[in-house]
Amino acid sequence: MIRRAAMLLPLVLAAGCVSKGRFNELQKNYDEQAAALRDREARIVSLEEALAAEEQKSKQLQQQIDGLSRDQANLLKDRASLAASVEEMQSALAELNRRKAEADARIAEYRNLLARFRPLIDAGKLNVRIVDGRMVVELPTDVLFAPGSARLATEGQQAITEVSQVLEGIPERQFEVAGHTDNVPIATAQYPSNWELGAARAITVVKAMISAGMPPERLSAASFGEFKPREPNDTKEGRAANRRIEIIVVPDLSELPGFEELQRAAGQQGS
């Protein structure tokens, strides 16, 4: 509209419709409005640019917010995972400490057993060993029995009495007496094989221990015959080492690792 007015002003002046003074006034008014229009147009452009910049900033800010949200979710997930790991580690540490305490107790019991039997060990009458994780009092049968016999010699009777007196003082433990032989075959009417000889010797020792004051409910007897040798049987010394009586300190299953899991499994099997 302003441009149309600018085109008409010279025509109006030429036609003599307005005076030159009025024309100048109109020209000035036109220039002012044109300038104002240019300012508004410049402001519009500036505002549009500012709006575009703000929209870009808003977009970037939203991206940052989205990124922070993802980071926060990951952080919460990591915290949950870390908390679970810490709890698992604490549980594992508690179990490790429990097992260490049990192991320390078994070591202390073994050392106590060694101390109790020290005089007999020093006298060469017996030995105390760990076999398959169990404490074993080992007596050579050559001291206890004559060859091929299950009758205790006088010296053997005395040794069993001394051993029984020591073992009786160990509370809440049971003992398995196991007979072992060498691989030299025996075939008599009384002992058709080394199985029978080993079993008869183990039962003889059990009876001697009961006579020495050991409660019978704490004892059991077993035979391994020739099938669990300590040494090769190809030498005289090896065969002598294999002829032995072992008094095994039976462990309390409730003290062994995995006992609770075993109990639960047995309960599930029976249900």
Image (tube, grey):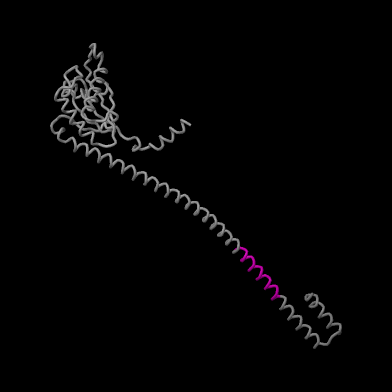
x and y percentages locating residue 234 in the rendered image: 20, 20
The overriding secondary structure of the stretch rendered in magenta is: helix
The image quadrant that residue 31 belongs to is: bottom right
Q: Is residue 42 magenta?
A: yes
Is 89 placed left or right of 166 in the picture? right
Tally the marks. 0
Using the image, determine if residue 204 lies above or below residue 249: above
Quarter location, residue 159: top left
Identify which residue is drawn at 28% across, 23% down: 222
Magenta span: 38-56
Observer-nearest residue: 53 or 198?
198
Q: Position of residue 65 (x, y in %)?
A: 56, 59
- Residue sitting at x 83%, y 87%: 19
Q: Is residue 135 left or right of residue 78?
A: left
What residue do we see at 64% from left, 65% from top?
52
The percent coordinates of residue 6 (x first, y second) are 79, 78
- Extreme residue in the top direction: 189
Is residue 225 on the magenta stretch? no
Quarter placement of the N terminus: bottom right
Of 206 and 141, which appears nearest the observer? 206
Relative horizontal placement of residue 141, taking residue 85 as reference (left or right): left
Displayed quadrant of residue 171: top left
At horizontal 38% and vertical 36% (from top left) the residue drawn is 259
